[in-house]
Image: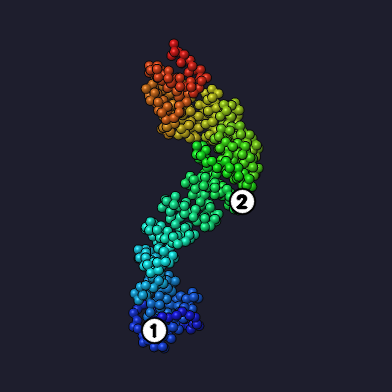
Amino acid sequence: MGIGFGACSTPTISKRIITPRHFSFQTDSSQVVKRAKDYVIRGSVLQMQELYADAILEFQMALRYDSSEVILYAIAKNYALLNKNEIALEYARMAYHKDSTSIPILSLLADILERNDEMNDVIELYEKISALEPDNHDHIFTLAQLFEESNPKRSVDLYKRILAFEEDETTLWFLSQLYRNTGQYTNYIETIERLYALNSDIRVANLLVQGYVNNSTYKKAIQLILPLEFLAHSDDFENLNSTLTEALVDLPDSTLQQISTLDSFLFQSSKHISADWKYYFYNGMLSERIHDTILSEIYFSKAIQLNGSSIELPLRLSGFYLQQGKFLSVISLLQKFTSDFPQEVRFPLFMAIAFSSMNNFQDALPLLRQAIQLDSTNFDAWTQIGIVYDHLHFSDSSDAAYEKALQINATSPLVNNNYAYSLSVRQTNLHQALTMAQKAVQAQPLNPSFLDTYAWVHFQLGNYDKAMEYLEKAVEYSEPSATILEHLGDTYFRLGNQNKAYEAYKNALVKSPERHSVIERLQKLSK
C-alpha cells in the first residue's frame, strides 16, 4: 500500500535495533493503516533531523503493520546513512524483491553495493535504471562514470549520448578528462574547446593553452591568449602567457620560425604592465630567440628594473646571454650586479667564460682566480682556468688545474678530453692521455671532439689504423671541424693514402681558409 511522508511530533521511545525478518501481512483495516502511517511520519521527521538510529526504530515499528517496499527502503536508507552497510544491504534487497522496478530502491541498492566495491553488480543495476528511464541524463551520466575504468569506450559513448541533447559543462568536463586519461589528446583538446565555448572561464583557458602547448599547436594558443590581455585579470593573463612562453623558449629555431603570429604576440604582450620580472624575462628571451633585439632589450630592461635584490635574474639572464653568444652583454650585465653580490662565485666565473669565448684569455684569467678564491672547490672554475692556461701555453699551470678539477669530479668527460688533448699535442704522458680520452668517448660516444681527441692520442702513439677508425666516425657523426679534417689528412698521409689526405686537407681549408698548417701540407702534396 502507498504510504505518504509527512511530519508530526516524535514521541519518546526506547531504542532497540531490530534485524530484518519476514513479516506476515496485517489485516488492511483503517486502524492498521493509521498506526503504520504515524510511525512512518515520525521516522521521516527523525531522518530529516539526521537522527537516523531513532528513525530506524520508528520505521521498524511501522514494519509490524505494513511490510511494503517503501518502509523496507526507508530502513535500508537510514542504515546506509549510518554506514551500517551489511544490514542496509539486507533491507535494500528485501525492498528490491518486492519492487524490482523502483528507481529509488535500485539506486540505493547500487549505492550500498558500490561501497562494498561490487562494481559489476552496481553497473548491472544502473543499466536497469537507465533502461527504465532512458531519457534521464543523470542515470546515463552515472553509468558513464561507472564505465570509465572498465570500459572507456562505452563511457565515451554514454557521455556523447548526453551531449547529443545539449552541450552540458559537467559532461564535457568529465569527457575531456576521460580523453586525457586514455591518451586521446586530440579529442581532449576538442572537448575543452567546446567547454570553453560554453564557459570562457580562465581556468578552462589555462587547460586549453596547456593542451595547445602539449600538442604543439602554438598558433591556436596565441589566438586564445591575445584577447585575454584586455578581458582577464592581470595575474590570469600572465599565467597564460607564461605557460606559452616558457614552452616556446625551449623550441629549436626552425620551429619558432614557423609560428607566423609570434612577433605580433610578443609586441602585443609588451604593452601589458606586470609587477613580476619573470613575465618580462621570458618574453625577452623569446624576443631574442626570434632576433628582435630591440624588443628583447625593452623586456630585459623592465625585468632588471623590477628585480630588486634577487640574484636569480642576473644569473639566469647572463646564462641565457652565454647560450646566445652575446658575451659583451654577459659582462655588462654582471658588472652592474657584482657589488650587490660580492661573494657570488658565478659572477666572475660567467664573465671569465664570456671573455674566454671571445679569445680574451688575459682578461678571463684574473676573474677565474677570483672565482677560485671565493670557492676553491668549484669544479667549473678549475675547469675553465685549465682551459685558459692551456690557451696561454702555461702547460704546468694548465695540468695542475685539470688535475684539481679531476680531484673534484674524476669522471668529467670535458676535463678528461681537454686534458688528454693537451697532453697529446705536447706528446707527453700519452698512455695517461689515452686512458682519459677513452673515458670521455665512453661517456659521450657520438661527440666528434672527443672522438678526435681519442684518435689523435692513438696517432701520437703510432696507432694510425685506430686513429683513422675514430676520425672517420667523427666525420660521419657530424659536420667536421677544420681540426678534425686536418687530423684525418695527417692520418691518411701516414697510412700512405695521399689522395685521401689531399681531399681531407682541401676540405679543412674550406672550413678555415687561413689555416697555415693545412696550406703547407697541400703545397707539399702538390709538388
Is 504 displayed left or right of 341 in the figure? left
Sequence-wise, the earlier of marks 1 and 2 is 1
Could you give the CA–CA distance between mark 1 and mark 2, rounded to whole angstroms? Answer: 69 Å
The residue identified by callout 2 is 230
| Mark 2 neighbour density, 10 Å: few (under 14) some (14–19) many (20 or more) | few
| Mark 1 neighbour density, 10 Å: few (under 14) some (14–19) many (20 or more) | many
Q: Amino acid at mark 2?
A: Phe
In which image quadrant can residue 63 be found?
Answer: bottom left
Please report the residue visible at 49 percent of the width from the left and 35 percent of the height from the top. Answer: 408
Name the foreground residue: 133 vs 269: 133
Task: Tell me the element at label 1.
Answer: loop
Q: Amino acid at mark 1?
A: Tyr
Quarter of the image where the C terminus is located: top left
In which image quadrant can residue 124 be found?
Answer: bottom left
Please report the residue visible at 45 percent of the width from the left and 22 percent of the height from the top. Answer: 507
The residue identified by callout 1 is 65
Quarter of the image where the N terminus is located: bottom left
Closer to the eye: label 1 or 2: 2
